[in-house]
Image (cartoon, grey):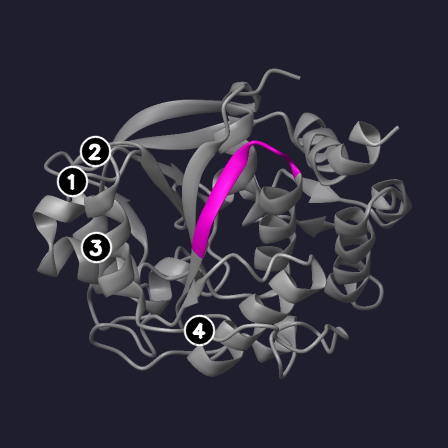
Amino acid sequence: MSAPTTPRRVIIDTDPGLDDAVAILYALACGQFEVLGLTTVAGNIGIEASTSNSLRLLAAMARSDVPVRRGAAQPLCRAGEELISIHGEDGMGGLALPAPQAEARGEAVGWLVEQLQSAPAGSVDILALGPLTNIALLVRDHPAVAARIGRLIVMGGAVDEPGNIGARSEYNFATDPEAAQIVLEARLDLTLIPLDVTRRVRVLPAQIASLRSSPAGDLCAEILALYFGSGRASRPLHDPCVMLFAVEPGLFSLDTLRLAVDVSDGPEAGALVRHADGPPIKVAMRVDGPGAIEALRHGLNRAQRSSC
C-alpha cells in the first residue's frame, strides 16, 4: 500500500466514542503519524467522559506520553446531545479499559495555539473526529494561528446522503452548526469526509477476527464487537475514514463543492446545502470500501508484522 515515508505530525480532535476509539488506535499503530496530542470536545459523550476515555485509550496502548487537553464542554450557541444509545453511558459501550496513567493538563485551544506557533507553518495536521467547536474557537480567536494548520481533515456532514440525526443533518455538524460554518468559511486546507463515503466503509461481523494480530487490533476487535450490539449485519466506520484518507488518499475520490451550513433553529440545523456563494470545499464523495477495511486491518497490525 502507498503511504508517506515520513510520519506526519498530527493532532487528533476527538469525542470518543466507539468509532473515534478505532480511529485513534489506528493512528497510534499504523506508523504513519507522529501524534502530538489529543484535544477533546463534548459530543458523543460529555467533556469529562470524552477526556477520560482519551486518557484510558492511551493507557491501554502504553502511550500515556501523548498529551491530552480538555476542550469545549458545550457547543458555541446550543445545548449538546449525547449519543448514549449508540456509545453507551460511558461513551465506550462499557469496555473495560485501564485507569488513566496521566492527567489532562491545560485547555485545548491554548495548547493548539502553542503547538501551531512553535512548528513550521503547514507542518501540523488536525484530524477532527467530533463537533468542530475547538477548531472554530481557534479560527475565531486566533485566525493567524489557524492559518498555520497543514491539512484539516474533518469527519462531518452529508451531501447527497441522508443524515443520521435528521433527514439531512449529520451528528457532528448538527451538534454545533455555528462551529461547522466558521470552519468551512475559514479557507483552510480542509478536506471533508461526509456520510456519503463513511457509510460505504462498513465492517462485517466475520471480519472482526481478522483484526486480532496486535494489541491495537485486539482492542479494536473488542470495540467493534460492542459497536455492533445485537443483530446488526454491518457497521459503518465513520471516524476511521479521516485517518485512512490521510494515509491512503487514493482510496477516496474528491469533488470540490460550494457548500453552506444550515444554522437555523429548525430540525435540519447543521445540514450541508449546495450554495453558489459557499466556499469551495474538497469533499470525499466516493471510496473503495473494501480497500479501506483492508487498509485499516493493515495499519492496526503493522507492529505485529514489524516484529516478525
Residue 305 point in image, percent of width and height: 82, 30
- The answer to whether 43 appears left or right of 3 in the picture is left
Separation of residues labelled 3 and 4 (CA atoms)? 17 Å
Q: Are marks 2 and 4 in contact (CB under 8 Å)?
A: no
Q: Residue at x 90, y 46 (%)?
A: 209
| Crowding at mark 3 (Cα within 10 Å: few <14, some 14-19, many 20+) | some
Where on the picture, by quarter, is residue 227? bottom right
Amino acid beneath label 4: Ala
Disc nearest the viewer among 1 and 2: 2
Q: Which stretch did the figure color magenta? A: 30-37
Q: Which residue is mark 1?
A: 147
Separation of residues labelled 2 and 3 (CA atoms)? 12 Å
The C terminus: image quadrant: top right
**In this view of the protein, can residue 128 be seen by the observer?**
no
Amino acid beneath label 2: Ala
Separation of residues labelled 1 and 4 (CA atoms)? 26 Å
Badge 4 marks a residue whose secondary structure is: loop
Q: Residue at x 79, y 47 (%)?
A: 217
> Disc 3 or 1, which lies upstream in sequence?
3
**In this view of the protein, can residue 23 be seen by the observer?**
yes
Q: Which residue is mark 3?
A: 113
Amino acid beneath label 1: Ala
